Image (cartoon, grey):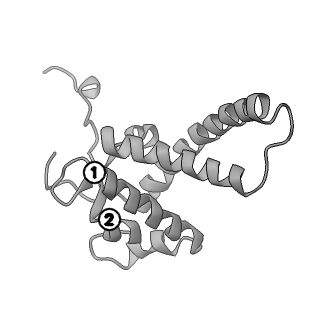
């Protein structure tokens, strides 16, 4: 990975999150079906424990992809990747800090994301807190997109 990659725009980040949102909803549908069928014996799944479970499930989704791949599926489509200041894959600790701070960025009515417009390097709160960044990989970063001369 190159140090020269530019930080991703807010629009590209939101597009990747929207794409990932569809995957997360599908994951929630599967896990909720299993919970209702197996654990709840057909009863409604609700309440704080269920909400915490869904939150942890989303955290696991992002932490897994950021740590092992550097990208969620939505990030792959929008050609962006999460990297450390050293342009390496994130550690588990960096992923956890990034996810928790991204949660704060969202629940503050998006102010953490809007910080990109005020930060010279286009970094959000969770980028700064975790010492990571989201980079744009360019037009054709994947081998399958590259054409032989």
Q: Secondary structure at mark 2?
A: helix
| Residue 49 on image: x %, y % | 69, 53
Gap in angstroms between the C-alphas marked 1 and 2:
9 Å
Which residue does the numbered mark 2 point to in the structure image? 130
Q: Report the label total.
A: 2
Which one is in front, 77 or 52? 52
| Residue 83 on image: x %, y % | 26, 52
What residue is rendered at 23% in x and 56% in y?
84
Which of the 4 image quadrants contains residue 129? bottom left
Image quarter where the N terminus lies is top left
Dot 2: within a 10 Å radius of its alpha carbon, few (fewer than 14), some, or many (20 or more) residues?
many
Q: Is residue 133 visible?
A: yes
Relative to 113, 23 lies left or right: right
What residue is rendered at 32% in x and 56% in y?
93
Q: Secondary structure at mark 1?
A: loop
What residue is rendered at 31% in x and 38% in y?
68
| Residue 63 on image: x %, y % | 41, 47
Q: Is residue 78 visible?
A: no
User: Is residue 91 placed above or below 23 in the rendered structure?
Assistant: below
Dot 1: within a 10 Å radius of its alpha carbon, few (fewer than 14), some, or many (20 or more) residues?
many
User: Is residue 66 placed above or below 84 in the rendered structure?
Assistant: above
Relative to 136, 74 lies left or right: right
Which of the 4 image quadrants contains residue 97? bottom left
**Residue found farthest to the right:** 43
Asked whether the beta carbons under mark 1 and mark 2 sit within 8 Å of each other, the answer is yes
What residue is rendered at 72% in x and 35% in y?
35
Please give the label number shown on residue 45.
Answer: none
| Residue 109 on image: x %, y % | 59, 73
Relative to 140, 96 lies left or right: right
Which residue does the numbered mark 1 point to in the structure image? 90
């Amino acid at each position: 990975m190159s140090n020269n990659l530019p930080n991703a725009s807010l629009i590209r980040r939101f597009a990747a999150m929207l794409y990932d949102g569809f995957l997360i909803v599908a994951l929630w549908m599967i896990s909720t079906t299993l919970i209702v069928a197996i654990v709840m014996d057909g009863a409604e799944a609700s309440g704080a424990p269920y909400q915490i479970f869904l939150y942890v499930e989303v955290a696991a989704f992002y932490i897994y992809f950021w740590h092992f791949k550097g990208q969620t599926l939505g990030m792959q489509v929008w050609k962006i990747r999460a990297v450390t200041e050293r342009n390496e894959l994130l550690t588990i600790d960096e992923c956890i800090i990034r996810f928790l701070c991204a949660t704060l960025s969202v629940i503050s009515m998006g102010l953490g994301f809007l910080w990109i417009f005020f930060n010279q390097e286009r970094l959000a709160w969770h980028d700064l807190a975790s010492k990571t960044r989201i980079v744009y990989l360019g037009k054709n970063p994947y081998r399958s997109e590259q054409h032989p001369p």
